[in-house]
Amino acid sequence: MRDVETLQEFLGGARVDAAVLALRPDYRAVLLAVDGLVPGPSDDASDRLLQAAEASACEVLSARSAEDLPHVAAWREAYKSFGAKPQRTRNSLEALLRRAVSGLPRVNRLTDIYNAVSVLHQVPLGGEDLEGYAGAPRLIRATGSELFDTIAGGAAMVEHPEPGEVVWCDDDGVTCRRWNWRQGRRTQLRDETTAAFFILDALEPITYEALDAAAENLAARLERLGPDVRIARRRLAGTPTPATTEGN
């Protein structure tokens, strides 16, 4: 299991390219690197959390549609800025909010937790298997030559992002396309995942304080998934701050 210093080192290498910040200077993120998780299927606790998220989404969407929420609208504009069509490629938050009305999926307790926190705090939240990473995570504007390992029509295949598309990547290729739209197969969370990397990202009007609150909620719930959970945290973009550690 990785110690906290190793988790900090991983987060310390993460960066956002200047070209992304030029596109959206208001972008900010909180990153969590976690190890010591004990895998498990969906359980009563994760089901109750998802039910609370579903109720929250229904309440939020009772007065307005998802695309009219200010933070969802901000992500739609961000997608348009690099040529994506938000009606066809919805950001992860909007996709979850829409799905929550009819019921969020029950996958495993780790995935259930981060999906629920995303909906409850209304921020896009990506979760990935840390074992699949090659080098540090980076948010860049793609050249179009990068590799993206995915599934299409039930078959494994490799795609390439569009030139200028905002993507998360590591040394081996793209880990998530269109900022927070679709995660790759190589780093996807699995039922046996014990080490994970989480990205909570936001645009205005979401503040760092709101993002930190979501990260606190996520970290508190992750700490319950094993007796030896270790967590490192870092703010990314804006004013740099050092990684912090949590755990038992």
Image: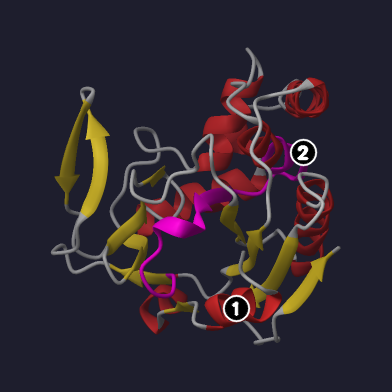
What residue is at 66 percent from the left and 49 percent from the top? 123
Q: Secondary structure at mark 2?
A: helix
Could you give the CA–CA distance between mark 1 and mark 2, rounded to whole angstroms? 30 Å
Apparent side of residue 50 relative to residue 84 in the rendered image (left or right):
right
Above-or-below relation of 143 to 84:
below
What residue is at 36 percent from the left and 56 percent from the top? 175
The residue wearing badge 1 is: 6
Q: Which callout, 1 or 2, points at the residue further toward the start of the chain? A: 1
Q: Name the residue nearer the viewer: 43 or 234.
A: 43
Which range of residues does the magenta coloring cover? 116-137
Residue 110, position in %: x, y?
Answer: 65, 39
User: Which quadrant holds the N terminus?
Assistant: bottom right
User: Is residue 177 something one can see in this rendering?
Assistant: no
Q: Name the residue nearer the viewer: 49 or 212.
A: 49
Which amino acid type corresponds to the residue marked 1 in the rendered image? Answer: Thr
**Mark 1 neighbour class, 10 Å CA radius: few under 14, some 14 to 19, many 20 or more:** few
Quarter of the figure with residue 121: top right
Quarter of the figure with residue 90: top left
Q: Name the residue nearer the viewer: 68 or 246.
A: 246
User: Which quadrant holds the C terminus?
Assistant: bottom right
What residue is at 69 percent from the left and 27 percent from the top? 64
Instruction: Indicate whether residue 84 is drawn in magenta.
Output: no
Badge count? 2
What residue is at 73 percent from the left and 42 percent from the top? 117
Apparent side of residue 146 relative to residue 107 in the rendered image (left or right):
left
